Amino acid sequence: MAMIAVEDLSVAFGSGESLVHAVDGVSFQVEAGDTFGLVGESGCGKSTILRALSGLNDHWHGQIIIDGARLEPKRQRSFFKKVQMVFQDPYGSLHPRHTVNTTLMEPIAIHGLDRADQRIAQVLEQVGLGPAFRFRYPHQLSGGQRQRVAIARALILEPKILLLDEPTSALDVSVQAEILNLLADIRSQARLTCILVSHDLAVIAHMCHRLAVMNQGKIYEELTVDDLAGNRPRHSYTRQLLQASLGYDRRLAAAATLADDGLDSGAA
Amino acid sequence: MTGNAHSTAVSAPSHQGWHAWLTAEVTTSPRQASFQRMYFGWLRFLRNPLAVIGLVILVALLLVAILAPWLAQYEVNEQNLTTRLQPPSGDHWLGTDELGRDIYSRLVYGSRITLYIACLVAVIAAPLGLIIGTTAGYFGGWTDTVLMRITDVFLSFPGLVLALAFVAALGPGIENAVIAIALTAWPPIARLARAETLTIRSSDYIAATRIQGASSVRIIVKHVVPMCMPSVIVRITLNMAGIILTAAGLGFLGLGAQPPMPEWGAMLSTGRQYMIGSWWLAAMPGLAILLTSLAFNLFGDGLRDVLDPRTE
């Protein structure tokens, strides 16, 4: 059975005239141990899906089933032991006045876990930060180190599901690869089920087994990474995204300029 | 966290190791981390000479209050009608008042009252404002509306008038004056805390705490309040001058400190009647109030530079 099953999920903001359907009837399934990618441009609703899944947003309709249990908008504390999330911006996701130690102590205290010291040392080791980082404040850390702390915080509760909201887009290119490799390692070690949200097809291709392309709150198509690698998209929007991901294309740009010139001369 | 392997390893630095311990690149215990933070804050504070002057005056004031019995030349309420309205001299450093009491000695004892009022108001108003402001800001909706309208009602009265009403209801006296002033001092703090909370509550680190399963109370107390603390501390420090003046105003109207208490504001207002002939009656307590208010303001400015998380 699927670890995560989302059925006809809708999230709307505002009311009346200004009602916006951020997510509009989305359905997908993620098998245990798989990594599912959600890709699309900014504002397409991919992060909103994660916020509904994680319980940060409780104004949703539809059905979410995680590990066989149907979710209510309001979550029990035990839910958070199962599902954790890593945020996009490591500069905003760590409390500026808490040391790494305090940040990692918090989930342990909330869930009343034992062996706090060992757990923290172990999880820091796991994300590649030595004990030297344990009593530092966020402002004493680099972006990549901060994101490692954020990952450690998500892992310390030993979740089954990890929701990743653009975990590398706020980082330096050189650091992005490190963090992605770290996430891939942790995923296989802990056999995590992940949902990765990104606008970067390269990141998705590197991390995911399957992915869904989203635009304007809807899933346009679902495809496997092999389809993506083999450049076999069915939907025109996916093709557009793929093309955009290849970067600046001289021929395409030239064609566009020619077309413009033709229009100009026609007008004159 | 006490007693874990990390905190015992480097928690007993030798005396010449203090500086190294405070500036170590790698901190090895929560205590060292927070001491280091305070040390760097202290260094930043020292870079502001005016703030240091403020701190020095406040420390001096504190010492004067503690050592009052040894510093005073005369008994605080010792009257001597043969030496009334004496100008400053060797016998009476700051002169005597209309009942022949030594002004210097009274000022020295009065510092205790001033500090007592300032501290008590801060201790009552700051937590009250913080709790109301952060609760309103964090929950929003109806909670916010109700709490903030109550705050608005308190804010819409001038502080002194509201304090007058409270003292009239509670009865005159220094304790009631303190309660009355505290009740007028919390609304600006609540507003400030609410505004700060509005920006904090939508941040990712609060979201991260929420999806760890933290309760609202836990989030407010452990995550929101520490972020509001610096601006509240700065605000209450900068408000101290106003608080001291309000206390003096209540004393002047006979609703605050009761005679013969050597409260500075009360001394100032009695001195007013003798201003033409004996300027020192009003000038000396006035100077003391001015100096203390100024010190609180300078110190508050310096604190803001140190405590603002954006400067780190």
Image: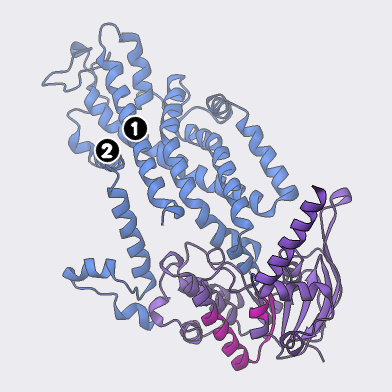
Chain colours: A purple, B blue
Question: Could you tell me residue A148's position as x and y percent?
Answer: 51, 77
Q: On screen, A204 above or below B37?
A: below
- In this figure, which residue is indicated by the disc labeled 1? B294
Residue B261 visible at all: no
Residue B241 visible at all: yes
- In this figure, which residue is indicated by the disc labeled 2? B57
Question: Could you tell me residue B233's position as x and y percent?
Answer: 45, 46
Q: Is the C-beta separation of discs 1 and 2 under 8 Å?
A: yes
Q: Give the quarter of the image for residue A228.
A: bottom right
In the displayed structure image, the side of residue B262 where residue B91 appears, left or right = left
Q: On screen, A88 above or below B267?
A: below
In the displayed structure image, the side of residue B51 where residue A158 appears, left or right = right
Number of marks in picture = 2
User: Which of B224 and B77 lies nearest the eye of the viewer?
Assistant: B224
Cα separation between marks 1 and 2: 9 Å
Question: Could you tell me residue B112's position as x and y percent?
Answer: 32, 36
- Residue found at x 34% / y 28%: B289
User: Which of A158 and B241 lies nearest the eye of the viewer?
Assistant: A158
Label 2 element class: helix
- Residue found at x 47% / y 72%: A100
Q: On screen, A153 above or below A90?
A: below
Quadrant of image for the N terminus of chain A:
bottom right
In magenta, the rendered stretch is A177-204
User: Which of B76 and A220 lies nearest the eye of the viewer?
Assistant: A220
User: Which of B203 and B281 lies nearest the eye of the viewer?
Assistant: B203
Question: Could you tell me residue B310's position as x and y percent?
Answer: 46, 53
**What subunit carries mark 2?**
B
Label 1 element class: helix
Q: Are marks 1 and 2 on the same chain?
A: yes
Quick one: label 1 or label 2, which is nearer the N terminus? Answer: 2
**Mark 2 neighbour density, 10 Å: few (under 14) some (14–19) many (20 or more):** some
